[in-house]
């Protein structure tokens, strides 16, 4: 890991990604806070909990940015300092995810359940649990096997949530607009296939990779290159769908999962550029 962080290109790439993520999160928090109370009670409830969650994510993002900045300038951190920083970053993200739970509970129709109800329930329950376990396992006196297990579990679930969320968008689109929305537009077929099949295949590969490492329980066995491949493929998926939206617009009237306002889309795309 030390050799990994000694690469100045990797340090610079991580700094760019974290900086972009923090700026976008701060923007989303500000916009959400300004708009609280402008709609009905349900939206007010969702916006309020979401804004509180974004505040925790923004603080976690700032802490991540400061931590990466030390590595970017070559100073680094001691192991206790790095662990303390990582623990609080993880805790902030866990609280943000918990704040999404109302969005998974308030589901007026089956379309909304498919589109974002199920993904919200999973990411606001399983992911926070994994992060809280990881937070506890990262105590200096604990063995690293537990941290490895829950870190890999959280990462794997994240990719499954991406698949559920984006596949749900496509399924809901087909329910609303019909199969012709796919059949009449080759780009939509490509995007649909990359999402429903491609992301699922990546999630399965990640699960297999994680399962093998968890069985070994050895941090030294972690293959950084394979993690890089997984991250790059995930980033390339979002980058590709985003570029299709930029170049061709909303094919057939609307393309799910390619909105320019999606933080996940363009932030993950940055990973693909490293």
Image (cartoon, rainbow, N blue to C red):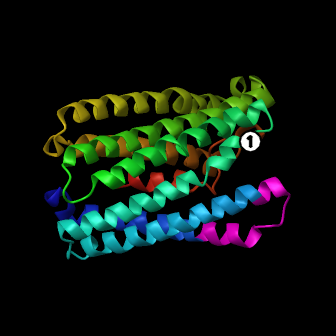
For residue 41: magenta? yes
Pick the residue in front: 149 or 249: 149
Pick the residue in front: 142 or 203: 142
The residue that label 1 is drawn on is 254
Magenta part of the protein: which range?
Answer: 27-44
**Residue 1: percent from left, percent from top:** 17, 55
Q: Is residue 249 left or right of residue 12?
A: right
Q: Quadrant of residue 85?
A: bottom left
Pick the residue in front: 68 or 58: 58
The C terminus - image quarter: bottom left
Q: Is residue 23 left or right of residue 256?
A: left
Residue located at (42% from left, 32% from top): 203
**Residue 139: percent from left, percent from top:** 26, 58
Q: Is residue 56 left or right of residue 181?
A: left
Q: Is residue 16 above or below residue 270?
A: below
Residue 13 seen from this side:
no
**Residue 86: percent from left, percent from top:** 33, 62
């Amino acid at each position: 890991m030390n050799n990994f962080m000694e690469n100045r290109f990797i340090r610079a790439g991580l700094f760019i990604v974290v900086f972009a993520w923090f700026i976008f999160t701060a923007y989303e928090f500000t916009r959400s806070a300004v708009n609280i109370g402008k709609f009905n009670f349900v939206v007010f409830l969702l916006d309020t909990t979401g804004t509180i969650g974004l505040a925790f994510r923004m603080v976690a993002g700032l802490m991540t940015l400061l931590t990466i900045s030390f590595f970017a300038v070559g100073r680094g951190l001691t192991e206790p300092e790095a662990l303390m920083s990582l623990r609080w970053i993880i805790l902030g993200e866990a609280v943000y995810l918990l704040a999404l739970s109302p969005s998974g509970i308030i589901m007026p129709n089956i379309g909304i359940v498919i589109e974002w109800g199920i993904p919200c329930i999973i990411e606001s329950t399983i992911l926070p649990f994994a992060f809280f376990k990881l937070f506890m396992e990262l105590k200096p006196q604990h063995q690293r096997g537990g941290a490895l297990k829950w870190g890999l579990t959280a990462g794997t679930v994240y990719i499954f949530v991406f698949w559920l969320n984006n596949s749900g968008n496509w399924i809901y689109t087909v329910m609303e607009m019909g199969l012709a929305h796919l059949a009449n537009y080759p780009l939509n077929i490509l995007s649909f296939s990359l999402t429903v099949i491609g992301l699922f295949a990546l999630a399965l590969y990640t699960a297999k990779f994680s399962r093998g490492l968890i069985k070994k329980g050895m941090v030294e066995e972690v293959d950084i290159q394979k993690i890089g491949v997984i991250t790059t493929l995930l980033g390339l998926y979002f980058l590709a769908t985003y570029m299709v939206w930029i170049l061709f617009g909303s094919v057939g009237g609307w393309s799910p999962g390619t909105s320019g306002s999606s933080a996940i889309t363009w932030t993950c795309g940055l990973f693909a550029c490293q």
